[in-house]
Amino acid sequence: MGRTILVLTLILMGVRCAHNETIPISERQRAVASIDIPQSWRTSTKFDELNLSLKWRAGTPDCRPGEEDVMQVHLASSDTVMIRGSKCHNYEAPFIHLLFGKRRVLLLDTGAMGAEPFPLRQVIDDLVSDFERREKVEVPLQLIVAHTHGHGDHVSGDEQFRGRPNTVVVGHSVEEVVKFFGFQDWPNTSVSLDLGDRVVDLIPTPGHEASSIAAYDRGYRNLYTGDTLYPGRLYISDFAAYKASVQRLVNFSKQYPVRYILGAHVEMSNEPGKDYPIGATYQPNEAPLELRLEDLANLNQILLHMQIPKLHRANHFIVSP
Ligand SMILES: [Zn+2]
């Protein structure tokens, strides 16, 4: 049972396809699946940009059993992995990000529950050991299981990581997040997390949820925003806190250049301002995950002019109080 869901497929486009090899990622994985590994993952080279030229799978019309694997794993560079849950598994289809440093690896979110098992631990274990082997890491990497926020569709794989060696699973409350990362003046100031030759800044973004954080990866200049900003319906539970958080991100982006904003879902179609219905398990023509700094600036302007929370449809997102 569950064999087929362990088949992990990478969708890589263009010329890169010519350089792909298919290599079983570990002996254990060999028993169940193999992952297509692009050249970019097989080298220690530091890339300047993530490879985002892929088509994310976005469900199927009927979501028949076995039609779509429960997750899609994309090796976006030599040290960065993006994972998306299947819309057929759980319509939220959240994104999960894995950022490797020389000493630690940061897992941002653990996905959503569905009817079938979601074998995230196995996938992460294999990726970590593959990375350790390639980099000839002598001390095993510490895995930090953290979250963009504490909602169920971002934390449901946490249990799989309890008891894993060299691992810390960060709690979901504001207190636990503040304590673990050492925030001094939540939510006003950010903290830096050194993964070993890779610094990630964590910025408090309460508003969608109280313990929300954004993560800025200095090397790639990408800002991971969870559910605070993504191409979809931006749900707000604390309007004043949310407005302040978006302004905080704008202020942050004046200090640090931002290439892409990477959120945790896609709910918009490619048609400006048009989203898919809530609960959609098939989004055949969806918008790309990545947003730009203009979108953050636009959201901030919209909020500055909004005294009370109300629906606002922008081209790439929808404010949905
Ligand atoms: Zn959420």
Image (spheres, rainbow, N blue to C red):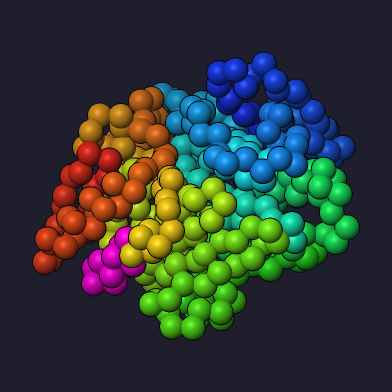
Quarter holding residue 32: top right
Q: Residue 296: within the magenta?
A: no
Asked if residue 155 is positioned above or below residue 97 in the image, the reply reads below
Image position of 264 with respect to 304: above or below: above
| Numbered marks: total | 0
Q: Please give left or right for residue 2 compared with residue 137 in the image.
A: left
Query: Which of the two residues, 82 or 160, is positioned nearer the viewer here?
Result: 82
| Quarter of image, res 8 | top right
Which x, y percent locates residue 121? 70, 51
User: At 55% from the left edge and 28% from the top edge, which residue is drawn?
Assistant: 68
Which residue is painted at 49% across and 60% down in the image? 215
Taking depth in this image into account, of 69 and 135 the one nearest to the observer is: 135
Instruction: Report x, y in % for residue 165.
Output: 80, 64
In this picture, residue 165 sits left or right of residue 293: right
Left or right: 285 in relation to 218: left
Q: Position of residue 143 (x, y in %)?
A: 70, 61
Q: Is residue 248 magenta?
A: yes
Q: Is residue 69 visible?
A: yes
**Which residue sits at x=57%, y=41%?**
48
Q: Quadrant of the N terminus?
A: top right
- The residue range painted magenta reads 239-250
The majority secondary structure of the magenta stretch comes to helix
Q: Look at the picture and state if 90 lies above or below 21.
A: below
The answer to whether any part of residue 238 appears in the image is no
